[in-house]
Amino acid sequence: MKIPSPILTLFIFLSPSLALANIETCLDSVCQGGEPLIRFPFRIEGKHAESCGYPGFIVSCTQNAQTLLNLPNWGPLKIQSINYAAQQLWVNDPKNCLPNRLLSLNLSASPFRAVYHQQFTFFNCSLNLEYLVSRYRPIACLSDSPKYVVFATPSPTAVGHLTSVCNLVATVKVPVQSPFYDQVMSSELVEDLRLSWDSPACGRCESHGGRCGFKSNDTFELDCSGVPSKGISRGARYAIAVCIGIPAMLCSFGVLSCICGWLKNGNHDRHWAHETVADFEALVGSWPTTVSGLDRPTIESYPKIVIGENRRLPKKGEKTCPICLSEYMPKETVKSIPECGHCFHAQCIDEWLPLNASCPICRTSPRKLPQPRARSSP
Ligand SMILES: *[C@@H]1O[C@H](CO)[C@@H](O)[C@H](O)[C@H]1NC(C)=O
Ligand SMILES: *[C@@H]1O[C@H](CO)[C@@H](O)[C@H](O)[C@H]1NC(C)=O
Ligand SMILES: *[C@@H]1O[C@H](CO)[C@@H](O)[C@H](O)[C@H]1NC(C)=O
């Protein structure tokens, strides 16, 4: 079925990607579908020009399409995900033995640091002490001999005990995912490491829907483009386009076809208009109006608090909003995601969730509220 060209024109006009096309000379890229999206400050060696990335943020793709971050002094790490707005990334060992990598952890010459760290002590114990295995969790990939097992523990009690019966291997500050790790007796240390970077500070730009990059390829001066004026984010513009643009289009189309029908008083024309509106509605129905984010009613339902003069938050120790990285101030409204309890400026998370239906910190996917169905499903 044919769609009249004025409607197509309007569609192209409303498309959000087109509005940004003018600023993107360094395109987003991936090693393979499903792998993390790579853009400034990262760049993929061989795919992106040098000026598309910040020094120290070099990514390469392996033959089996893993996304590797190449760190000086510490070798490659597999990138699991990147949160550009929070300036954080999650990494693991490409060879699936993270504890082995942790034994030689060295972030000193890299732009990355731990968000939270926890001190783990590694022990190498003779397997004659079999009762240890029932008490602590052996690190399988380091315990490949039948003669000994390796444990890692953050617990001072366990350290006290193991020191007396095993060989201490090393003490390592592990970049853990959350500060609530200390209850464990011992760990196999398989969880992704959480790292962050301070420079370049593109988080604010990204969290407002913008894209960061160098002003030109001969300076390190940064530029943020694509943030709409008046602080309306990409998501908001998209929502506005969908909420106002489509009804307006439908409405003006309806009015036009009515006028046409009335002027010509011809059954044929009226039939044509009716059919086209039906086509158009089918098209709108198949259009992904919720890109990957969370719906408004769900976001609105989240608990909010206004920070008092003492700046006390539901979770102790969180002084800055992980999205915009600015400190919480008295009288600001803070919102938390009920599923995981992480807090953010209400304004920041309200812009984040319509674009990404996951917590920026722990990647928990919040549940959507059950929705009344507006349209019977096809
Ligand atoms: C990390 O690597 C640098 C450079 O090789 C070295 O000077 C430093 O001592 C290393 N740090 C650790 C903790 O091994
Ligand atoms: C543990 O001890 C054994 C025997 O002394 C040694 O071969 C092995 O390399 C040690 N493992 C680690 C991780 O230190
Ligand atoms: C930027 O880099 C490209 C390719 O490396 C080069 O052709 C171009 O002249 C450079 N532009 C400036 C302003 O240096």
Image (spheres, rainbow, N blue to C red):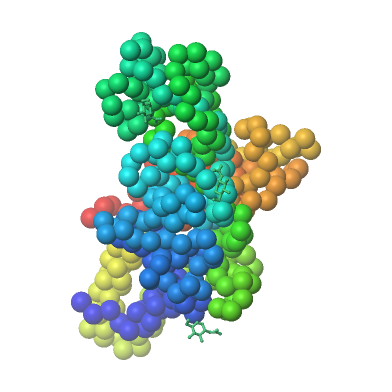
| Residue under the point 38% across and 61% down | 60
Q: Nearer the viewer, residue 378 or 158?
A: 158
Q: Position of residue 351 (x, y in %)?
A: 55, 55
- Quarter of the image for the N terminus: give it: bottom left
Image-quadrant location for residue 221:
bottom right
- Single out the residue that lies furthest toward the bottom: 264
Residue 360 against residue 265 in the figure, above or below: above
As drawn, 6 above or below 239: below
Where is 15 relative to 128, above or below? Answer: below
> Can residue 127 be spotted in the picture?
yes
Q: Position of residue 314 (x, y in %)?
A: 63, 32
Residue 254: x %, y % from top left: 38, 75
Residue 268 at x, y = what percent?
Answer: 22, 83
| Left/right of residue 258 with respect to residue 156 in the rendered view | left
Identify the residue at horizontal 30%, vertical 71% (top origin).
Answer: 280
Image point (49%, 55%), residue name: 72
Quadrant of res 226: bottom right
Residue 31 falls in which quadrant of the image?
bottom left
Q: Residue at x 50, y 17 (%)?
A: 163
Foreground residue among 249 and 92? 92
